[in-house]
Amino acid sequence: MQARLSGETDFEGFRSQARTLLSRGVAPEDVQWVTGDADGDLFAGDDSPLAPAAAQPGVAVPASFLELCKTVVLHRDPQRFALLYRLLWRLASEPALRDDPLDADMMRARDMARAVRRDIHKMHAFLRFREVPDAGAPGGVLHVAWFEPEHHIVEANAPWFMRRFTNMHWAILTPLRCVAWDGKALRFQPGARRADAPAADAGEQLWLTYYRSIFNPARLKIAMMQKEMPRKYWRNLPEAESISPLVAGALARSGTMVESAPTQARRTIRAIARPTPAPAAPETTLEGLRDAVQRCRECPIGALATQGVPGEGPQRGGVMLVGEQPGDQEDLRGRPFVGPAGQLLMRALAQAGLSREQVFLTNAVRHFKYEVRGKRRIHKTPSQAEAAACAHWLEREIALVQPRAIVALGATAARSLLQRPVAVMSERGGWHARADGLRVLVTLHPSALLRMPADEQEAALTTFTGDLGLAAALYFSEATLGPSRSVEGFRSSNEKFLNG
């Protein structure tokens, strides 16, 4: 007896026919399963469709077996329907069969299901679309892919691609079945030839470049690679042509990597939670500059820092102190000179007669540059290019604050302000003039004092305080006498200030 199904994946037809055959008591060996228009066995007898039998108690099967049948039906083995009907027939008299892990028929069905699921997964992974003009949408693009599945999985797989590429118009060509999506409905057609698939497009070369760039020779495991990417799929993968050269050169590339200097892994620093930003203020104000600095990525260090650190202090006519860059504590708190170097600076300012509230504190570079050592972020001096990228922030801040004079703390600050290399040790303690006439006093950065031997720090602090005393003398003299005094007058005032 023949049982004819409408197609290779006609699960509902199989289910109906199997139910009728079971109700009639037809043994599995007496049934020949035929799909579509295929010719059956000349000796199989009647191939007319089976009429539904009178209602009889059916065979109760677990839901897992039903799912197994749906998957096995997609297998390419022509004997799959006979196998499934034989299992159904046996389940009617052998209920324990459903839990028998060693039964040959059940093992065969499960192997077939695994093969189908693997084929579905490989189709997800190895499908490569190429772009062609869309004849159905003038000016549009149709993405066409060629794939050679082992089993009848196209119809079962099509909804997955429809969900994944909903906004694309695409077509998948296979020797067994083709499917197309026009943004509205899936359309299935008979199988196609490989020659019907389009040739490589411009995007394919970009994909090959990306594939070669992510290939890591140090992690190459050929057996595992071939397990995940079996050779039978290579003929349709554009990147397959790169695999052999990359594998051949892997050993030499690994050797080069081993001999190269180690690189420092980036430490992930959790960003400080910030309140919802208010509308950006214009950059003609200090608040506007603060907002703009937070968005600045003109050099790489901005991406690594927790936040930008703008200057702070009183505006108009005071003294500005410019350091090199924020440190670890400044980076976390968003304020200049709050770390150990800042505390030393406050101590020296106090000895010079100034307080933090009387000076404007800022830096030449607005983000913290560092390298990670263990759990610590160690300061790194910014390059000239990084300082130059930040120079316009400092100049705009100077224009808004309009200080009477500036104290450059260290070489980086002095170079940014005077636009030339500055030998701090030989030029410290003296006033210099910028091109715009603004006076700049050069001295050490307080962090340099912290790095000195302990027995030298006290003397160095006294000298450093003397340098700051020049700025204090300027601050107090111009605050009371006006800005007409000369640089020499400031030095004289400072000597009086220091000597009492």
Image: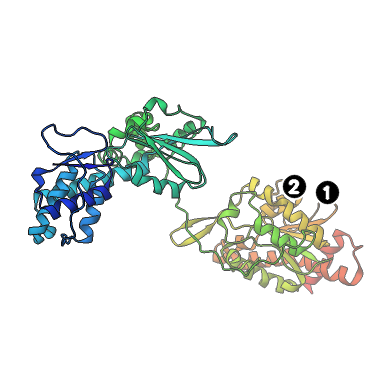
Residue contact at pointers 1 and 2, CB within 8 angstroms: yes
Residue 74 lies, with reference to residue 273, above or below; the image says above
Please name the amino acid that badge 1 sits on.
Answer: Ala
Give whichever of discs 1 and 2 has the lower sequence position.
2
- Which residue lies at the image location 71% right of the left edge and 70% below the top edge? 349
Question: Observer-nearest residue: 301 or 93?
Answer: 93
Question: Observer-nearest residue: 53 or 106?
Answer: 53
- Which residue lies at the image location 50% right of the left edge and 42% below the top edge? 182
Q: Position of residue 147 (x, y in %)?
A: 36, 35
Label 1, secondary structure: give it: loop
Question: Observer-nearest residue: 87 or 356?
Answer: 87
> Badge 1 local density, few (<14 within 10 Å), some, or many (20+)?
few
Circle 1 is placed at which residue position?
435
Question: Observer-nearest residue: 354 or 275?
Answer: 275
- Apparent side of residue 457 relative to residue 118 in the rendered image (left or right): right
Task: Give how far apart the Cα atoms at labels 1 and 2 are.
Answer: 9 Å
Can residue 358 be seen in this snapshot? yes
Q: Position of residue 372 (x, y in %)?
A: 48, 57
Please name the amino acid that badge 2 sits on.
Answer: Gln
Circle 2 is placed at which residue position?
419
Q: Position of residue 274 (x, y in %)?
A: 60, 68
> Badge 2 local density, few (<14 within 10 Å), some, or many (20+)?
few
The C terminus lies in quadrant: bottom right
Quarter where residue 456 is shown: bottom right
- Which residue lies at the image location 21% right of the left edge and 52% below the top edge? 52
